[in-house]
Image (cartoon, grey):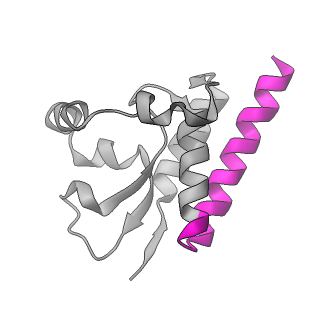
Amino acid sequence: MAVKLNQRAYDHARDLIVAGKYVIDDRDAWSEHQPSTRQENDFIQQRGIGEYAKWHLGIDGREDEDKKGRYKFPYGDFEKVHRCGLLAAESRAGQRNYYDVELAVAHLHGMLEALHRTA
């Protein structure tokens, strides 16, 4: 099975955006803003893999549910949605032909941009 949309993560990201918990950052800032491996591991240790999964818009059905490798396309820093994370996810999903993920990310990106313009 290929990577598919993580609906729970999509809903979580949408709720965060509506609540104003987002960062409008530069397109290329994701390498600096994405959580480090240590931050990811600490988050999993404190909150569990289920909470970790909510920060990833893709699920790889070939991987075990309790492994980090199952969860693809991160979009935030475990507190806020990052515009640069959405843009990176949208681009990578498109390159890999994961259309459901790409479409969902494009919708989240559009929501973020619309809210930002009205702010």
Looking at the rendering, the stretch of residues picked out in magenta corresponds to 94-119
Q: Measuring from the top left, give residue 118's x and y in whole percent.
A: 85, 22
Asked if residue 82 lies left or right of residue 36, the reply is: right
Q: Measuring from the top left, give residue 90's x and y in whole percent.
A: 61, 54
Extreme-top residue of the structure? 119
Residue depicted at 66% across the width and 30% down the height: 18
Magenta highlight on residue 10: no
Residue depicted at 49% across the width and 27% down the height: 80
Asked if residue 15 lies left or right of residue 106, the reply is: left
Residue depicted at 58% across the width and 74% down the height: 97
Extreme-bottom residue of the structure? 1
Asked if residue 99 lies left or right of residue 80, the reply is: right
Q: Main secondary structure of the magenta part?
A: helix
Q: Nearer the viewer, residue 49 or 101?
A: 101
* Residue 16 found in image quarter: top right
Can you say whether 93 is above or below 105 in the image?
below
Q: Measuring from the top left, give residue 67's x and y in whole percent.
A: 19, 58
Residue depicted at 55% across the width and 47% down the height: 88
Quadrant containing the N terminus is: bottom left
